[in-house]
Image (cartoon, rainbow, N blue to C red):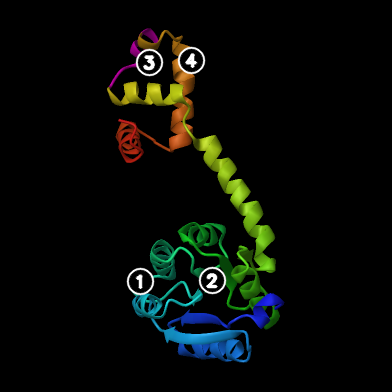
Amino acid sequence: MGNLANANPVTIVLADDHEILLDGIGSILAEQPWLRIVGKAASAEAALALVEKLQPALLITDVSMGERSGQWLTEQVSKRFPLMKIMVLSMHEGVQHIHALLEAGADAYLLKSVKQDELLHAIGQVMKGERYLQQSIAGTYTRGLRQHQEAERQSRLSPREIEVLRLVVEGLSSADISARLFLSELTVETHRKNIGRKTGAKNAISLVRYAQEHGLL
């Protein structure tokens, strides 16, 4: 691992509610002289307590762990210890799932099926300050995220559409809105169709709910 092998061992806390996986990963890492496991936890709460007490260089966590999730743990650790590195090991490979963990503060995301060599390589990269996605999911994630962002962009209401939406919620007719905004009724109807398509609102009640949920009123 280059310079890392010659430095002080990377201290690690492991968090997983499956003891077999916890021991399996632990045994792999324990064989590496440049890594040192300082604590293991079977829940997010216990892991947070260990992290606060031991302040390791790296937290390796599962996602699904009882009442509190790995995402909650990641958020808590990244807020309290911004310099600590966080690696997620999960069975989930959905784009939104991965994105949520990275947004929460994870530095790396790998599947539990990851090969030993790639796991160790990922730890090395993360400790050098790099973000790491397992190679087998990196391409799929990048494409999926791009598609998700494009869908969000297309569904975003324009300033004029927001203006029309507010007037519709007030109960104004297309003719009233046309007069208020100095637009043709045809243009107003086009805006209303676009608003319905982008928000998914089927009626006035769902339109009001959308406006409230998105702070548009």
Local crowd size for mark 3, using a 10 Å CA cut-off: few (<14), some (14–19), many (≥20) = many
Which element type, helix, strand or loop, lies under badge 1?
loop
Q: Amino acid at mark 2?
A: Met
Q: Main secondary structure of the magenta part?
A: helix
In this rendering, the answer to whether 140 lies above or below 150 is below
Q: Mark 4 or mark 2, which is nearer the start of the sequence?
A: 2
Nearest-to-viewer mark from 4 and 1? 1
Question: Which residue is more in the foreground, 203 or 157?
Answer: 157
User: In the drawing, what numbered circle is on residue 174?
Assistant: 3
* Alpha carbon distance from label 1 to label 3: 49 Å
Q: Mark 2 or mark 3, which is nearer the start of the sequence?
A: 2
Question: Which residue is more in the foreground, 196 or 112?
Answer: 112
According to the image, label 1 marks what residue? 68
Question: Which residue is more in the foreground, 188 or 135?
Answer: 135
According to the image, label 4 marks what residue? 187
Which element type, helix, strand or loop, lies under badge 3?
helix
Which element type, helix, strand or loop, lies under badge 4?
helix
According to the image, label 2 marks what residue? 87
Q: Mark 1 or mark 4, which is nearer the start of the sequence?
A: 1
Residue 177 is a magenta residue? yes
Q: Is residue 22 left or right of residue 205?
A: right
Which element type, helix, strand or loop, lies under badge 2?
strand
Residue at position x 65%, y 65% in the image: 137
* Alpha carbon distance from label 4 to label 3: 9 Å
* Alpha carbon distance from label 3 to label 2: 53 Å
Local crowd size for mark 4, using a 10 Å CA cut-off: few (<14), some (14–19), many (≥20) = few
Q: Mark 3 or mark 1, which is nearer the start of the sequence?
A: 1
Q: Mark 3 or mark 4, which is nearer the start of the sequence?
A: 3
| Magenta residues, start to end | 171-179
Residue 141 is a magenta residue? no
* Alpha carbon distance from label 2 to label 1: 17 Å
